[in-house]
Amino acid sequence: MNVFSRRDRPALRGGALALLAALLFGASTPLIARVGDGLGSFWVAALLYVGAAAAGALTWRPATSEARVRLGDAPRLMAMALCGATLAPVLLVWGLARTSATGASLLLALEACFTVLLARAFYAEHLGGRVLAALALLTAGGALLVADQARAGVGAQWHGALAVLGATALWGLDNTLSRALAERDPGQVVLAKSILGATATLAMAAGFGQSPPAAGAFLALFLIGALGYGLSLRLYLLAQREFGAARTGSVFAFAPFIGAAVAFGMGERGATLWLAAGATLMLAGVLLHLSERHAHQHAHAPLEHEHAHTHDDGHHLHHHDPQPMQAHSHWHRHEPTNHAHAHVPDAHHSHSH
């Protein structure tokens, strides 16, 4: 049996997807610092999201497999593009030019805190003791890593650090807004958000008279954007679909350690016992998330919606002729149900505790 399809551990698949997203995004930060050094921040942000748009287009699924993005989603997509694909990357690139890649990578750990708090406020997602403990470990690990950089005198240019911190807050809001679109085709969401973000930043680059980068940097930023922003966002949306915004954001807090490790591999020396201790705490937090099991008797109210689903999860009991064996998407109705099983805050489990 595929371990990611086990119904008694629904957090495992979501945690694995969030961790993969964190690996791709975390590795992108020091690469952007290296490739984008000396380039205009608007051009760098634009090329990252041009690459992300290409990833979205390549992963677009047919309507029979994934729910379509709707016209009513446009305001949310525009807000996501403004926060996450325009302002946040520009602030990140500007901050990277004024602080170390390692220090900036580690500051991104605070994105999880913003995401969890906003997810709790917007969606009232249940956070049990294990999730809170995991978040505490991840936050403590990130704090140790940041403190290590401050102790070593890295990132003393606080204006750069504050710009990175602003980017994390905006991405936290972006993550929270994207939760409502997690049931849509992630390829379409990535494509729409990226096109909006790339268009805005290209217009800013032209307005501020920034020159485009040379061909080598152009291609490198495009590829970094495709993997670190486009594919990473797709995985992030799928993780939100599996186990909610708060848990996805918390596991995603592992990204800064990945960025710090890549920066170290690229020549930024500074590995210390503090860094090792912080990394250990963050790893423990991720493992806590992956091992979460939350089960109790709960009721499902009648619900009608459209999203990708299968018929072996205990919730999609409607019939087809013939019955499809693979994941598919269409408008369907859930009848009232009362049962007990392991679950996480997904589209079918938003009940209060």
Image (cartoon, rainbow, N blue to C red):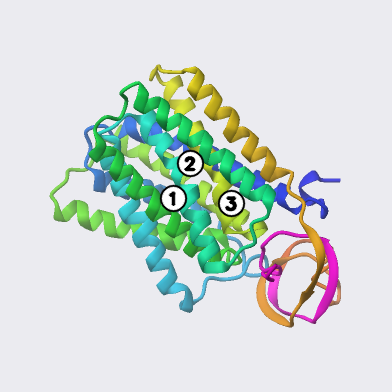
Give the number of the mark in front: 2 or 3. Answer: 3
* Residue extent of the magenta highlight: 329-353
- Mark 2 residue crowding within 10 angstroms, few (<14) / some (14–19) / many (20+): many
Residue 260 drawn at (x, y percent): 45, 28
Q: Secondary structure at mark 3?
A: helix
The residue drawn where x is 53% and y is 55% is: 116
Q: Are marks 1 and 3 in contact (CB under 8 Å)?
A: no
- Label at residue 228: none
Above or below, 241 against 232 in this view is below
Of the residues under marks 1 and 3, which one precedes in the sequence? Answer: 1
Residue 66 drawn at (x, y percent): 63, 66
Determine which residue is flagged by label 2: 25
Above or below, 322 against 99 in this view is below
Residue 159 vs residue 30, the one in the foreground: 159
Q: How far, Cα to Cα, is label 1 from label 3? A: 20 Å
**As drawn, is 195 to the left or to the right of 206?**
right
Does residue 297 appear in this view? yes
Q: Amino acid at mark 1?
A: Ala
Residue with the most extreme left position: 209
Quadrant of the image occupied by residue 64 = bottom right
Above or below, 178 against 8 in this view is below
**As drawn, is 237 to the left or to the right of 337?**
left
Above or below, 93 against 64 in this view is above
Residue 53 drawn at (x, y percent): 43, 54
Q: How far, Cα to Cα, is label 2 from label 3? A: 14 Å
- Indicate yes or no whether the magenta region holds residue 330: yes
Q: How far, Cα to Cα, is label 2 from label 1? A: 12 Å
Residue 287 vs residue 137, the one in the foreground: 137
Determine which residue is flagged by label 3: 248
- Mark 1 residue crowding within 10 angstroms, few (<14) / some (14–19) / many (20+): many
- Label at residue 52: 1
